[in-house]
Image (cartoon, helix red, strand yellow):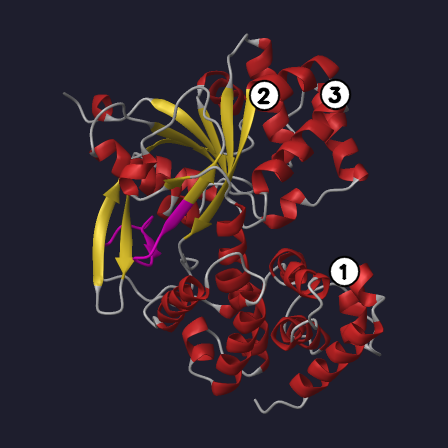
């Protein structure tokens, strides 16, 4: 049997191929395939640039996954991706969407926050038969191709760090489809399942990772040993046995999303902006700084008070995340994490503040410190962000993130205190 014949048949299309997808969803699929039974191959499409697809295709889409523990590296070869395409290849994308059973997406948080102008631009592209540039536009384009071909139901799985990501994806897809074709909208509503999922595996960008000595694969991806995937939703055309790799299928993913977003992801955003302010470059460096460490503990205390888990479970998760953050062999660059902090804060920090206020508590010193660290870093020119007024930058940032909170004078006052404290912190 030839090597090509041994590859799994394509049953999954993925949009947004990058290091995280190759360390997470592709790895789960690889482990499930190794266990036997029906095998699932992935046709992967880039989101913006074709570089990753070209590099993978040049080596038959096989690559090494370097699992970097605190004491050393182990290497696994991943073959679950069997095709890699430029995301702008309309023919390949439409062909894949006509036949696959599952679509997974890693398109990052900003792709879910769209306005009428962006939707209108996508609608113009769709009306002319062109493949839109946006992720949402491409999803609708692919679903239209499936609908026109008489394709059956399928599941679309969101793998981005957003609370209720499947429902958010469904809302955006239907909003765009409604501008294009009422029949397509009705078909999507009836035939397409939007699955929410909580994803977790720290995967630094290749340029930031420590040198790899365990393999000479130019497409190798570095990741940590820890991994989690919790999914909620229907798979009407089937799916891989991801449970064999440790995935959990649950009725409601919301508590798990909150726990991860409010502890790990919010912690990352706080450490990124505060750590950069204090002259650090990686998560592990920031964790070794008592000022950053204290701010992180306060952030977690704030979240723990409103998380829907027993205190013992929250403490266990805090210990696990602490160990992961302290792993200096996972060189997770603060600059990478700090990108799009205004979007990330809206889903990682602002909901905690709102939940605390609804419960009669204060806004939370740790949560406000995360917002203040961002506004201070932006005003200092250390982190890219929106233009904010020079005077009262902290309040301007809060107004951008959550206008309703910016109207609360007690929150504004606490935020000013936090921002002033950060401005005076030693570097």
The quadrant in which residue 380 appears is: bottom right
Residue drawn where x is 78% and y is 61% of the image: 400
Q: Are marks 1 and 2 in contact (CB under 8 Å)?
A: no
Label 1 vs label 3, nearer the camera: 1
- Is the residue 409 above or below the residue 181 in the image? below
Residue 294 drawn in magenta: no
| Residue 378 spot, x, y in % from top left | 69, 72
Q: Residues within 10 Å of mark 2 (few under 14, many from 20)?
A: many
Check disc 3 and report the residue beneath it.
180
Q: Which residue is mark 1?
A: 402
Residue 54 point in image, percent of width and height: 42, 38
Give the residue at the far left of this rendering: 1
Q: Residue at x 72, y 65 (%)?
A: 357
Rendered residue at 54%/60% (across/down): 307
Q: Is residue 227 magenta?
A: yes
Q: CA distance from mark 1 to mark 3?
A: 32 Å
Mark sitting on residue 231:
none
Give above or below for 100 relative to 79: above
Dot 1: within a 10 Å radius of its alpha carbon, few (fewer than 14), some, or many (20 or more) residues? some
- The quadrant of the image that shows the C terminus is bottom right
| Separation of marks 1 and 2 at Cα, in angstroms | 34 Å
- Residue 143: image tag: 2
Callout 3: helix, strand or loop?
A: loop
Q: Which residues are magenta?
A: 214-229
């Amino acid at each position: 049997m030839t090597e090509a014949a041994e590859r799994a048949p394509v049953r999954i299309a993925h949009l947004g191929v990058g290091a995280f997808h190759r360390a997470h969803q592709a790895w789960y699929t690889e482990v499930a395939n190794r266990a036997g039974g029906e095998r699932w191959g992935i046709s992967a499409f880039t989101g913006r640039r074709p570089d990753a697809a070209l590099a993978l295709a040049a080596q038959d889409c096989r690559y090494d996954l370097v699992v970097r523990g605190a004491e050393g590296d182990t290497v696994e070869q991943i073959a679950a991706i069997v095709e890699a395409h430029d995301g702008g290849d309309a023919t390949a994308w439409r062909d894949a969407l006509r036949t696959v059973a599952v679509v997974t997406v890693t398109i990052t948080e900003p792709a879910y926050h769209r306005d009428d102008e962006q939707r209108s631009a996508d609608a113009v592209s769709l009306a002319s038969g062109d493949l839109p540039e946006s992720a949402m536009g491409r999803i609708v384009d692919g679903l239209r191709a499936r609908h026109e071909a008489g394709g059956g139901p399928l599941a679309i799985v969101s793998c981005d760090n957003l609370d209720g990501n499947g429902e958010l994806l469904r809302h955006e897809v239907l909003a765009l489809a409604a501008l294009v074709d009422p029949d397509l909208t009705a078909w999507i509503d009836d035939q397409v399942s939007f699955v929410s999922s909580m994803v977790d595996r720290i995967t630094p960008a290749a340029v930031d990772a420590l040198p790899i000595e365990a393999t000479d694969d130019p497409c190798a991806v570095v990741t940590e040993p820890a991994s989690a995937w919790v999914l909620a939703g229907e798979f009407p055309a089937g799916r891989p046995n991801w449970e064999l790799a440790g995935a959990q299928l649950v009725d409601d993913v919301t508590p798990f999303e909150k726990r991860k977003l409010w502890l790990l992801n919010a912690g990352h955003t706080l450490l990124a902006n505060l750590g950069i302010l204090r002259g650090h470059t990686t998560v592990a460096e920031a964790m070794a700084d008592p000022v950053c460490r204290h701010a992180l503990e306060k952030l977690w205390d704030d979240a723990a008070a409103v998380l829907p888990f027993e205190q013992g479970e929250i403490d266990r998760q805090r210990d696990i995340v602490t160990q992961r953050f302290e792993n200096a062999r996972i060189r997770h660059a603060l600059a990478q994490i700090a990108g799009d902090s205004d979007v990330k804060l809206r889903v990682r920090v602002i909901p905690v503040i709102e939940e605390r206020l609804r419960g009669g508590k204060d806004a939370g010193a740790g949560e406000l410190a995360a917002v203040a660290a961002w506004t201070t870093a932006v005003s200092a020119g250390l982190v890219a962000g929106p233009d904010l007024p020079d005077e009262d930058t902290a309040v301007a940032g809060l107004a951008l993130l959550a206008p309703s909170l910016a109207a609360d004078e007690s929150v504004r006052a606490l935020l000013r205190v936090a921002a002033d404290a950060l401005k005076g912190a030693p570097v």
